Amino acid sequence: MTKKEFDRIEAYMLTQMQDAAHDRHHVYRVLNAALDIAGHVDGADMDVLTAACLLHDIGREAQAANLELCHAQIGGEMAFDFLVSQGWAAPKAQHVRECITSHRYRGDNQPQSMEAKILFDADKLEVTGAIGIARTLIYAGQVGEPLYILGDDGDVVLDGGGAEITSFFQEYNWKLKKVYDAFYTERAKEIARGRQKASMDFYDGLLAEVRENYKHAASRLIK
């Protein structure tokens, strides 16, 4: 890919990024991670991979406006149309679309090509370690999700989630702690393992502090 092509794709991406948890720095980190992973595998199409990384979250604004939409599907269509308008051959633009439509953790559309698997892994590295915790909390704040909710027994609710995440602790147990087993490439697994302890330590520490705060609270309030 020439610098001119990169600059055009980057400029289009920058017009679409409005979400603080999925901002341009997230995109650049995904691209950097993808280039790292690609250096450990053979035969990846770097033009397709670079374009897919730059454009993978351009559907976020549409999803934010209508939560029934999938940003991966919308973004894939937007990327295809944009790349074709820039003179890309339809089959190559279609390859980028397929990478983007299959990058979502919550989606049923699993990545098939090497480029799609690299994008998936690079994007999922963004929910590992300290970065993953920080981004999850930023996003939770944006959509009004609390750190925790309490069950009828007065303890923090840890389970549940999926499509109906209602707290940070539920999101951690539904996704953040499980993503370490979801990578396709050995390089991504290696990076993720190096980050895992930071995530676990934060979760365990936060949970302990919340529980300690509520310990014996009822006996203090009710005489």
Image (spheres, grey):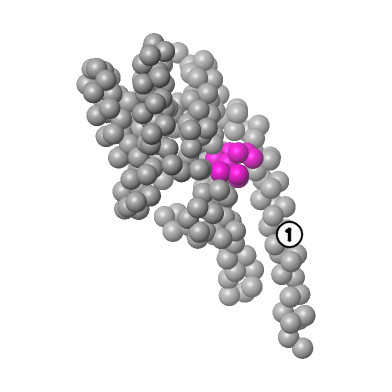
Secondary structure under the numbered disc 1 in the rendered image: helix
Q: Give x and y (percent) for residue 3.
A: 41, 13
Q: Give x and y (percent) for residue 64.
A: 38, 49
Q: Quadrant of the C terminus?
A: bottom right
Amino acid type assigned to the residue bearing label 1 in the image: Glu
Residue 170 sits in which quadrant? bottom right
Q: Residues within 10 Å of mark 1 (few under 14, many from 20)?
A: few
The reply, left or right, for residue 131 in relation to residue 110 is: right
- Front in this rendered view, residue 188 or 55: 55
The reply, left or right, for residue 93 in relation to residue 165 is: left
Q: Quadrant of the N terminus?
A: top left
Residue occupying the point 36% across, 32% down: 100
Q: Which residues are magenta?
A: 127-135
Residue 163 sits in which quadrant? bottom left
- Front in this rendered view, residue 108 or 50: 50
Residue occupying the point 77% across, 80% down: 220
Q: Residue furthest bottom?
A: 223
Q: How many marks?
A: 1
The reply, left or right, for residue 134 in relation to residue 219 is: left
Residue 197 sits in which quadrant? top right
Circle 1 residue: 209
Instruction: Decide if residue 110 is in sight here.
Output: no
Instruction: Decide if residue 100 is in sight here.
Output: yes
